[in-house]
Structures are given as C-alpha cells and as structure tokens.
Image: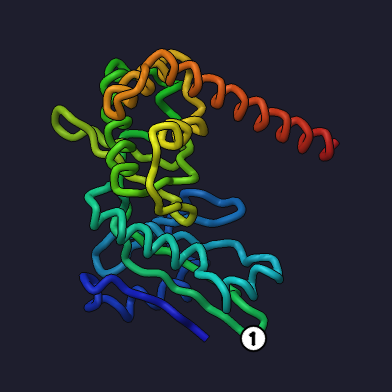
Amino acid sequence: MRTYAVNPKYQSLADEILAIPERFAREGRVLTQGRNVIKVMEVGGMRLNVKSYKRPLLINRFVYAYLRPTKAERSYRYATRLLQCGIGTPEPVAYIVYRNWWGVTESYYISLQVDCDCEFRALKVDRPADLRQILVAFTRFTYRLHENGMYFIDHSPGNTLIKRVGNGYDFYLVDLNRMKFKSVSPECGLRNFYRLDADDDMIDVIAAEYARLRGGDAKAMAESLKRWTHDHNARVAARRAKKAKRKK
C-alpha cells in the first residue's frame, strides 16, 4: 500500500514524482550514503533532493504505519509550515510511503535541490572573512524561528545550508523530522544553539545578538551557551570513543 502527498504546485508532474522510488536504486547522484541515502535526481526538468529513509526497526514500522506520521511525512508537513512562516527550507515537493501489514517498508522525502555556499559546520573550519556577519544573520534567522513558535530539535552543524545573496544571506533548514511547536522562552531559545559545535568566539557573537533580540544579558547568555556546548561536545566525544572501543 502506498500513501503520499504531492505539492499542488507540482501536481502536473505527479506521475513522474511518484515513479521516483522505482528509479531510485539505479539513477541519481549520491550526496549521502549511510543510515539514509540522499540523491539528486532530475525529474521534469527539475533537480530534486530525494531522501530515502532506512527501513525502521520492526516496532517502529508498526508505529509509523498506524500511530505516528513517518519521518518523510513529518518533513513534508514541517517544511510546508516553515515556508508559510517565511522560514527558509528547500521547497517540499512530495513524500511517498510504502506499507504492508507489518508496517512501513519504504519512505521518501522529496524537495527541490538547493545549491548553497556551505553548511554551518564549515564555518568553524574555514573561518570565512564574513564569519561575524553570517553568525549575526543566522542568529536573527533562528530568532524568527522561535518567534513563530518553532523549536528545531536537530539544530546541528549539518542541518543549516548557507547561501550568500547580494549583501546578505539565505539560510535553509534541512532534516526537519524532529521539531516542536511551542512558545520558546529566551532560555529555551538560547539552548537551541548548543548542538552547533561552535567555537567560543562564535558563541560570543551568537549570544550577544540573541541577547539583543530577546532583551537578555549577553555575558550571562554566552557563559550559559558555552557551558551547554562544551557539555554536549564532551558527551558526543565519549559516545564516539565508546563506540570505537567496541569495534576493536
């Protein structure tokens, strides 16, 4: 059994879009291949970003089939909601989910491919000349997200695409399946930055701008965000070390 939704804007291409799962294994350029597979595919003259999710564990197959929307469906819904609020994300094109009696077997989220200058993760390594301006603009972008009652749980270095446009910047959130919709307090909003793996000087810029926007104390916010960031990075490093040790 197949369930799906196609963006009304692309309804004229629905047959070609819905045929993507049949073509996925043999066509397209691989961007990411791991737990999930992401490819760029040409459909109807458009360059599409197609994410194929790994088949869930047995219990989750049932949950996603009967109790909770799949990651693909949530990504489509959340992207639509973000764009309605003027928050950048690649335009959603469709989601496609296959089920059998046991639950979900395959799922795909399809969006327009966005060619960007970099991901947020590159800022820490490349240290571009306009780093400060990017961080200020990114903080304002995240503030708009929070002002619209949205909290992006996976606000991590690989999930924001950055594109220079004229004298400014466009930001696009990706990997959207984990979001909360709620009132975001200043402290809660500040915590939303701790997974970004930013250096301390980058945190100073982010905290100062967020404090200005939320009416907080820049020094106190910077100290808190550094502590949360360092603690998170230490936990990540410990998990990686433990995983590496098990492999030996």
On the image, the x and y values in percent for residue 5 come to 36, 75
172 sits to left or right of 199: left
- Across and down, in percent, residue 106 comes to 56, 72
Q: Is residue 208 left or right of residue 166?
A: right
* Label 1 sits on residue: 101
Label 1: element kind: loop
User: Few, some or many C-alpha atoms within 10 Å of disc 1 (few <14, some 14-19, many ≥20)?
Assistant: few
Question: Which residue does the image show at 18% across and 35% down from the upper left?
Answer: 165
The quarter holding residue 138 reads: top left
Identify which residue is drawn at 41% across, 36% down: 189
Question: Mark 1 is on which residue type?
Answer: Trp
Q: In the figure, is residue 67 to the left or right of 127?
A: right
Residue at (41, 77) in percent of width and height: 4
Q: Quadrant of the C terminus?
A: top right
- When the figure is inspected, residue 70 is found, relative to residue 90, above or below; the finding is below
Q: Position of residue 112 (x, y in %)?
A: 30, 57
Q: Is residue 168 above or below residue 184?
A: above
- The location of residue 39, given as percent across then percent down, is 44, 56
Which of the 4 quarters of the picture holds residue 7? bottom left
229 and 50: which is toward the camera: 229
